[in-house]
Amino acid sequence: MNKSMLFLALGLACASAFGQAPITLKTELQDNSPKFMLDSGGKASGICIDIFNLLDSKEKIKFVYANAFVATKAIEANVASAAADVHCGWVKNEAREKIATFGEELFKVSYPGVVRAADKVDFKSVSDLINLESQGKVLGVNGVGSTSSLQKINGLLVDDSAKDAEQALKNLAAGRGRVFVYTSLAINYELS
């Protein structure tokens, strides 16, 4: 009798687990390392891919995406229109709260500035950068939240021509700006 009950319990548990259909969610990759990265062969990796893989293995939630980067504005439009179901690692803001539901934060992000080692100009605030006029140019990455926030600061000169952090750092090294401001997560990754 005990063996029969054990097999019945195991059978019901397995039937429940195997009977549950996996959930499939469409998402897109944002060009924002280390959240998302593509190797030379086009294979995706990064923090969000690790999270997707964990949810797939533990909870039967499968994430479907093309191995290609999609611009931030396009991702927002696709989530709003339901062409994409979810996105990983967004900064919560008023506009995004209208199109998506946000869960608990998995990690905190700050926005440090990176300067050239040989730069001798002393500045301690955004006001100092504004007062430097063309010598206080801030470099950002086109289409990302930190750059958009900087562009809203009256009098601050912001160059958002870089398509990614690597290009912005090259622009900084070439002297095309005074400071590069980006997320701590990505800056730490790019500088390592």
Image: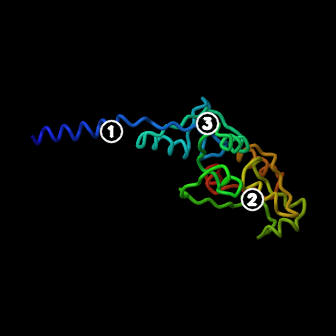
Of callouts 1 and 2, which one flags the residue occurring earlier in the amino acid sequence? 1
Q: Are marks 1 and 2 in contact (CB under 8 Å)?
A: no
Whole-percent x and y of residue 24?
51, 36
Whole-percent x and y of residue 104?
53, 58
Crowdedness of circle 1 by 10 Å Cα count: few (<14), some, many (20+)?
few
Crowdedness of circle 2 by 10 Å Cα count: few (<14), some, many (20+)?
some
Whole-percent x and y of residue 120?
80, 65
Q: CA distance from mark 1 to mark 2?
A: 56 Å
Structure colour scheme? rainbow
- Number of numbered discs on residues: 3
User: Between residues 136 and 32, which one lies in front from this camera angle?
Assistant: 32
Image side of residue 5 versus residue 100, left or right: left
Mark linked to residue 38: 3
Crowdedness of circle 3 by 10 Å Cα count: few (<14), some, many (20+)?
some
Q: Amino acid at mark 3?
A: Leu
Circle 2 residue? 115
Mark linked to residue 16: 1
Considering only vertical position in the picture, is 66 above or below 143? above
Q: Amino acid at mark 1?
A: Ser
Nearest-to-viewer mark from 1 and 3: 1
